[in-house]
Structure formats: C-alpha cells, structure tokens
Image: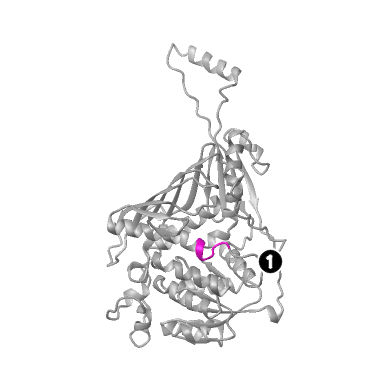
Amino acid sequence: MSQERKSVPEPPVASSRRKFVKSVAAGTLAAGVPSVLSGQGRTERRTMARGPFARTRVPPSDRIGLAVIGAGGMGMADVNTALRIPGVELVAACDVFDGRLDAARERHGDIFTTRDYREVLARDDIDAVIVGTPDHWHQPISVDALNAGKSVYCEKPMVHDIAEGRDLIRAQEESGRVFQVGSQGMSSLGNEKARELYEEGAIGQLNYAEGFWARNDPIGAWQYPIPADASEQTVDWKRFLGPAPDRPYDPLRIFRWRNYRDYGTGVAGDLFVHLFSSLHFVVSSRGPTRIQAAGGLRYWKDGREVPDVLLGVFDYPETDTHPGFNLSLRVNFVDGTSGSTFLRLVGSEGAMDVTWTDVVLRKNVAVDPMDAFSQEKMAEAAAAEDGLPPRVRMLPPAEVRYEVERGYRGAHVDHFFNFFQAIRGGPPVLEDAAFGLRAAAPALACNTSYFEDRIVRWDPDEMRLV
C-alpha cells in the first residue's frame, strides 16, 4: 500500500484496552473527535477521502495473471472490479455452465476456458484466482489453489462447514501465498473511520452492537432467473455437486444454490458474515463465545431449505481491545420498507451507525450534575409547576456525519487493491484465513442453532466449537 493511500491501523497491542478504559474514565477524547459534539442537536458533515492509486502504470514484470473459478454473477462482478486495478490481466475462466464460459469469452476476448478448475491451477501464467463458486466448493478449491502456488481471493464465507477452516488456514501458512476473503466492507472508508473513532473512545465504553440487512425483491431473495439454454448437456451437473450428496439434475439447485443447505450457508453465511467481519475489524475482536438464533421461512416458500428471516444473539467476552458486550443481528428478506443495511455500535457516551460509505456518530448531551447553576434552574422550574414532580429534560444528541468523497471507487475496489498489493509484496491482507474463520464460524453456528434448536458455544481464540 502506498504512502499516498491512507494505511489501516495495526491491531491494538495488549495494553490498548487498559489505555482505552483509562481515557474513557477521564472523560477525554482524542483530537479526531470533533468539538461540535459539545453542541446540542447539531449535525456536522465531514468527508472521508482515499488517496490515489500507488501506480497507474505497471511494468510487464509486475503484471498479475488472474483467473476466475465460478464465473457467475458474483464471480464476474469480482473480475470486473479486479481489472480496475492497474497491472491485472484476466487469463482464464472456469465454470460448470457453458453459457457462462461463452459470456466470459465474449466480454474478455481470447481467454482460456474450462469446466475443470484443476486445468486452471496447472497453468503457469496464472498468479491468482478468484473463487466465486457456490459455498460448498470454497474450501476445497482454495486449498488446491494455495497448494498449487496461487494466491486466492475467496468469496465469503470461506468455508461451508466450520470444520473445514483448519485445513485452509494450514494451506495458507504452508504455501506462503496471499489468501483473502471477499467481505469487501473490511477495506472500506466507512469501516476504517469507525475503527479510528472507536479506538479514540468516541462512544465511551462499548456495551451493545447490532446489525441489520434487509431485502424486499425476488433477486435479493435469491430467486435468480434460470438460463434458457441450461440443460444436462450444457451443465456439468456431477462437477457442480462435487462433495455434495448425489441427486438427479435440478436447475433450481444449481442456479439458485443459496437456497439449499447442500451448497449454500443461508442468510447467515451470506450476510451475517459481512457484519461479523466489519464488527471484528472495527473493535479488533476475535468473536463471540455464545450463539443463539431464531427465525423462519415467512414468505419465499419456493422450495428453499433455509429461512428468509433470521435473528442471532451473541455474547462477546471482555478482551484487551473491548469490554464484554452483546450483539444482535437480523436478516429480513420480507422487508416491505425498501430495505436497509447497517452496523450500529452503542457505548456509554454515544453510538455509531456504520456502513461502507458513511459513519454517523451521535454523542449524548446532558447537563453536568456538578453544574450548580443548571441544577438551581431545574429546581426553580420544578417549584413553579404547582408542586408536580420535576420534569426530566431530554436533549437531542449532537451528531457528526462522515461521508465518502465524491467519486469514491468503493469498498470492492479497495479490497482488491489491498489483495494485489499484498501479492506484490506490500502490507499483508487483514482478512486472511484465520480472520475469515473467526467471522464465518459464528455465522455458520447460527445455522446450527436454528436447525438444531440449541445454543452453540465457540472458542474464538482456539477457533473451535466447545
């Protein structure tokens, strides 16, 4: 990462928690927290900016050959974003549906295409791969790619089952290659500002967090269209199934795979994992210890096997970087209000609403109980009200809204920029396999809690179920 581009703060050292608590107790905030917060009911707008790319021209010796494995909607969206980074060239595409391979050649020219991802990994002109397959293929292909000497950008969640995480972490460590999970918000201006504000003590002592992801349309609820040319001749059904149970060809299962437990991880694995990734980055957390979920299939009763409304409740223990706190997460695919996405952190002195493109910081405004003049005036007001009990005065919070600069390239570009910079010898990625498992495991544990109707306990340090 260049010096022109704002660097992401290193994780706090072990003493940061003690320093943080001390600063909160003293009622002090770092200079980065605006003075406007002492006002009443005011809103100040501030801009978050990202510096230019480090290089616009890359020498041929530093070019990165890229392949995509899983050339569907997410995989090709990732390709389009990756190619915005200077010096990246698409070399190959792999998919089990011929129609997607045809579309990749039409868009990107004379690239190598195949149904068999192993043919991609065998090529010497490929340095990195995007794994954009259904979830049940994420870990096997990522492990094979790392073992083949390729760097990997793997869509979230990085595993289909928690038990797969250890082998993937080991493959990353032994290969020495770059592995990054595709929760793009990790690299966003919004998350970076939220982390900065949190570490400065802007909300006081964290005690609660919540996240919400809502959708209200068929595509958002995974009712994807079935290609007209899809058939047993144009789809490699057996290769799609892979490690999943054998069954007859079913176009719904391949083109709407997120709805089925053999291939997808439900709303928790698809969306909770984003919220876990952002939260863990902002407060430097390793994760919760207690997980419980509830929900149901309320509207999209189209044969899917996973709920369209899911709620999770999580207990986070005290660590060196944060106090003990509670988290609640919600996903609603039946939202009739137009949908929304946010992560909210609530503390003893204020709260932050965090998205990838803005942060809204609200601070409590109250009368100092040691202010004798204010106390006297309140007493006078109470005495003038015919002996009625004193009226409590609620002041509106002071608010600062941080918004991204005009023309911001977005979290997806930032995330790929970090990935390719790490490949070129720059700073290591933050969302590596260990971070990815600590975000994926509590999300997947929600499915266990929901389907087995029980509380799940997780050890985020040892990364194992208890």
* 191 displayed left or right of 458: right
Please tell me which residue lies in front, 204 or 41. 204
Residue at the image position 51 percent from the left and 54 percent from the top: 280
The residue under label 1 is 53
The structure's colour scheme is one colour
List x then y, in percent, for residue 122: 52, 86
Residue at the image position 50 percent from the left and 82 percent from the top: 93
Residue at the image position 72 percent from the left and 79 percent from the top: 59
Q: Is residue 211 above or below residue 130?
A: above
Please tell me which residue lies in front, 267 or 117. 117
- Amino acid type, mark 1: Phe
Q: Is residue 108 above or below residue 85?
A: below
Residue 166 visible at all: yes
Residue at the image position 43 percent from the left and 83 percent from the top: 99
List x then y, in percent, for residue 297: 29, 58
Please tell me which residue lies in front, 275 or 339. 275
- Residue 27, picture quadrant: top right
Q: Quadrant of the N terminus?
A: bottom right
List x then y, in percent, for residue 19: 61, 42
Q: How many marks?
A: 1
* 439 displayed left or right of 361: left
Q: Quadrant of the C terminus?
A: bottom left
SS assignment at label 1? loop
Residue 215 visible at all: no
List x then y, in percent, for residue 155: 48, 69
Q: Which residues are magenta?
A: 430-435
Q: Is residue 421 above or below residue 343?
A: below
Is residue 261 a member of the stretch shown in magenta?
A: no
